[in-house]
Amino acid sequence: MSTAPAGNGSLWRHGDFVRYWSACAVDLVGSGVTSVALPLIAVVSLHASVWEVSLLTFAERLPPLLVALPAGALADRHRKRPVMVGAVLVTAAAYAAIPAADAAGHLSLEVLFVVALVSSTASLFGSTARISYLPSLLPGERLLEANAKVGAVASLADSAGAQLGGAVVAVLGAARAVYLDVASYLACAFLLGSIRTPEPAPDRASGSSSLFGEMKQGLVYVVRHPTIRPLLLTGTAYTAVFAVLTTLWSVYLIRDLRYSPTALGTLLSVAALGGVAGALAVRRLVDRYGPARVMLTALAITPLTEVPLLLAAPGRAGQVFIATGLFVQLACATAQGSTQRSIRQAVCEPGMQGRMLATGQWITYGTRPLAALLAGAAGTWLGLWNTLALGTAALALPYLVLLASSIRSLHHVPAAPTASRAHPEGEPT
């Protein structure tokens, strides 16, 4: 397979994109296993309360608020592939501590808190480098297709991982099932390390020599950019609301609806297939209706997909009802996510890709630890169902934010900028 840019040919003939795509797949299969195993370790094995589960989520989601900006500046300072590989190996080592502690009889919530912090920090550095690396691997006109393919495999891998996670947890136990995630990170590191396309040396001529100056430059660039800014505000509202919902989902399904590990894994597996459907459809939908209509429609449908979770009763019928809603939800999330990511990558200057992404993560994902604490407090004081109902109503906010912006009239994905460097002040050239 060729390692040259794919041009108008199939991306499946681009050898290095296939390696990149495969690395994302194996990484996410392992993470799908952990998405089933960790809530069960906390809730079932360690008998964590709603507040303790929220604190665990807080620890997992805190790193974007603390290190996203330096992660983006470092990604633009250095070649991204070594950062990707190193971050994956650190994450593998962190997760290996869970089954090791369990075997030694020392597994506790404190261990989970430390693993959550370390693994999330390493993953942030790795994902910042990985996503901002894609525009240097492929030409701008292939980014929507590439992001759609990555989105499809992400959803498919999540589905397979969640289903596999339910089965592995049932056979090995929740703690030992995490070994599968460790193996997936090692495979991911091997695939990323085998990419052969030369990566251009970072262009340092346009930025400040200090790390803080480069972080500030990225922040100013994003805030002043007429296209990236409204997408970022929409993503912030979307992520903040879902951070509240996802903190309480697993607890509600396990405790109130009494789902077994196998049922939980099957539900997440079937739901994740919606992401595959969204990824397969997004390119044709954007070509036909334009990116603005695709994103607005997806955001308008999303609140309705939470209704089954609120109305479902324990039992098989309830599981099918919830899975259907989450299937549509993942389809909408993947379609609008792939579209907005492609727009941001296309309009961003090459030398600002890492900082643009990291600034977005800092602002958008920085709300998640606070939302996790809010979820824990609201779930404790108001009850799980009432908090989930309020979160469902709040899902109208992302739609309203995007509708009020200039993006609502965007009829096509913009072309990549012709300039190669950002303005010294951090403004788009």
Image (cartoon, grey):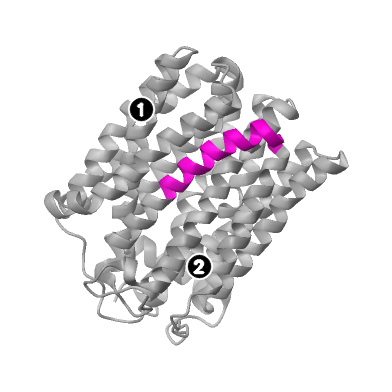
Instruction: Kindly indicate whether the residue at mark 1 contacts the one at mark 2 (C-beta within 8 angstroms).
Output: no
| Image position, residue 168 (x, y; %) | 63, 37
User: Horizontally, is 245 left or right of 10 in the view?
Assistant: right
| Image position, residue 405 (x, y; %) | 24, 49
- Which residue occupies 34% across, 50% down? 337
Q: Which residues are magenta?
A: 154-174
User: Horizontally, is 155 left or right of 179 in the view?
Assistant: left
Identity, as a three-letter code, of the amino acid under mark 1? Gly
The kind of secondary structure element at disc 1 is helix
The kind of secondary structure element at disc 2 is helix
| Image position, residue 218 (x, y; %) | 44, 68
Name the image quarter holding the N terminus.
bottom left
Question: Which residue is denoted by mark 1 in the rendering?
Answer: 325
Would you place residue 241 above or below residue 360 in this image? above
- Which residue occupies 73% across, 48% down? 114
Question: Which residue is denoted by mark 2 in the rendering?
Answer: 129
Instruction: Give the Cα separation between the discs numbered 2 and 1.
Output: 33 Å
Q: Give the mark, 2 or 1, whose residue is nearer the N terminus.
A: 2
